[in-house]
Image: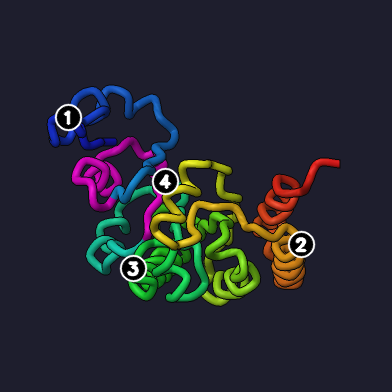
Amino acid sequence: MCYLDLDSGRKRDWYGGARLVELMHYLEEIKIFGCEPLFCETSRALILNTRKPPWTHTSFLTNGTLVTDRVIGALEAVRIGSVDVSLDAATAATYERVRLRGDFAKALDGARRLVELGRRHAIRRFSVFADFVVQEANYRELKSFVDLCFDTGLTPNFTIVAASPEAQRRSLLQRTGGSVRPQSFRDLNDRLESALASAEGLNMGFAVRSLRRVQQQVAPPR
C-alpha cells in the first residue's frame, strides 16, 4: 500500500484515500502483502478498516510479531479472507538466522492468536497459513515445521527460494545461508520425503500439495 521513496526518504501512498474508496465497491477481496503491513500506517489502517463493503474480504501477509491482543480485538470486526504468517523456521535458532535476530517466540505467539481468532470469528471463520520458503538455512526443519503447524493449527505452505546470484552473494556476506537454495539435492529430497510422510499421516492436504510442488521444482532435469 505504501513504499519508501529512497530518493526523498518519504513514504508514498499508492492506493490511499478517496481513490481506494472508489475502488472498494468493486472488490471481492483485498490482499495486502510486502514488508510488514501492520507496521505501515496505511496498510494497517486498511486491514483494520471496518467500513469496507460487507462482501469484501481482507487477506494479508504478516510476520506475526505485531499481532497483539489489541490487533486481534480490532480484527474481530473485519471480514477476513485468509492470513499468511511468514515463519520460515521451526526453531528459534533457525528463525533468528533467517530473519537476522528476529523474535521467533513473538512471531509464533502472533500466529497462535490468529489461529484462535480464525476458529471463532463471528463474521467469517478463516484459515491461517504458515509460509516456509525452503532454503539452505532451514530445509533441515521441513518435517519439524509440519509437526509444529499441526500442533498450533496452522496450515503449512511451502515454496522454494528463487535461484538468485545476488541473493547468494548477500548470504555469503551475512553468513546466514538464507535466500540460497539447498546445496545437497539428495539431502533435500530425503527431508522432503520425510515431511511429506508426516503431512500425509496427519491428513494435511494443503501441505502435501505444496511439498510436492517443491519436489517438482527442485528435481534435476532428466
N-term-proximal mark, 1 vs 2: 1
Q: CA distance from mark 3 to mark 4?
A: 27 Å
Secondary element under disc 3, as helix, strand or loop, is loop
N-term-proximal mark, 3 vs 1: 1
- Dot label at residue 59: 4
State yes or no: discs 1 and 4 in contact (Cβ < 8 Å).
Answer: no
Q: Which residues are magenta?
A: 38-63
Secondary element under disc 1, as helix, strand or loop, is loop
Q: Total of numbered circles in the picture?
A: 4
Q: CA distance from mark 1 to mark 4?
A: 31 Å
Q: CA distance from mark 4 to mark 2?
A: 37 Å
State yes or no: discs 3 and 1 in contact (Cβ < 8 Å).
Answer: no
State yes or no: discs 3 and 4 in contact (Cβ < 8 Å).
Answer: no
Residue 219 visible in the snapshot: yes
Q: Tell me what residue is drawn at x 21 percent, y 37 percent.
A: 4
Q: Tell me what residue is drawn at x 17 percent, y 29 percent.
A: 7
The amino acid type found where label 4 is placed reads Ser
Nearer to us in this view, 51 or 39: 39
Q: CA distance from mark 2 to mark 3?
A: 29 Å
Secondary element under disc 4, as helix, strand or loop, is strand
Residue 20, given in percent of the width and then of the height, sits at 27, 27
Please tell me how crowded label 1 is: few (under 14), some (14-19), or many (20+) other residues with Cα within 10 Å. Answer: few
Q: CA distance from mark 3 to mark 1?
A: 28 Å
The amino acid type found where label 3 is placed reads Arg
- Dot label at residue 7: 1
Q: Say which of marks 2 and 3 sits in front.
A: 2
Q: Which residue is the site of mark 2?
A: 186
Q: Which residue is the site of mark 3?
A: 101
Residue 58 part of the magenta segment:
yes
N-term-proximal mark, 4 vs 2: 4
